[in-house]
Amino acid sequence: VQLQASGGGWVQTGGSLRLSCAASGRPVSTLTTAWFRQTPGKGREFVAAIRRTGTNTYSSNSVKGRFTISRDNAENTVYLQMNNLKPEDTAVYYCAAGPNLILSSLPSAERYHYWGQGTQVTVSS
């Protein structure tokens, strides 16, 4: 499975961006897919995940109500719509994919087998 993340960029506080993660090699509908983010000197932080069914989505408390993860099976792509962005959202964002995971495992980066290359999101104040 290969993942290609895109859509990052620079935006002012309160702005929006949509990240895309295009998958190849396996249908995303057979995988749990997620977004993580990382800032210098810190580990990867869980942002949001969508399970194989496509109907169950989960997000961290820090982005709940502002970020939405979704999936387009026809395009084999996972999206992260980010609204009302804040400076603390500045990070490199990674998409990840793995097997069917239980709820408690979704935030664990080590559970995901496949990773995209990361895309930088910068939010200015």
Image (cartoon, rainbow, N blue to C red):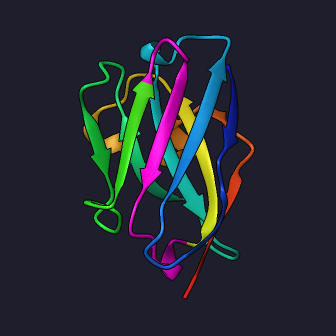
Instruction: Give residue 90's quadrant in the image.
Output: bottom right
Measuring from the top left, give residue 14's x and y in whole percent. Answer: 43, 75
Percent position of residue 65, x then y = 25, 60
Q: Is residue 115 left or right of residue 103?
A: right
Residue at the location (32% across, 61% down)? Answer: 66
Give the image location of residue 31, x and y in percent. 46, 20
Can residue 85 be seen at all in this image of the molecule? yes
Q: Residue at x 60, y 35 (%)?
A: 21
Question: Can residue 107 be seen by looking at this rendering?
Answer: no
Number of numbered discs: 0
Please state if 93 lies on the left or on the right of 102 as rendered.
Answer: right
Quarter occupied by residue 43: bottom right
Judge from the rendering whether residue 80 lies leftward or rightward of residue 68; answer left or right. Answer: right
Span shown in magenta: 72-89
Query: Which residue lies at the image location 45% right of the left edge and 55% below the top edge?
Result: 46
Residue 105 lies within the magenta run: no
Note whether 117 is above or below 62 in the view shown: above
Asked which quadrant contains residue 44, the reply is: bottom right
- The N terminus, quarter of image: top right
Question: Against 110, is 98 above or below?
Answer: above
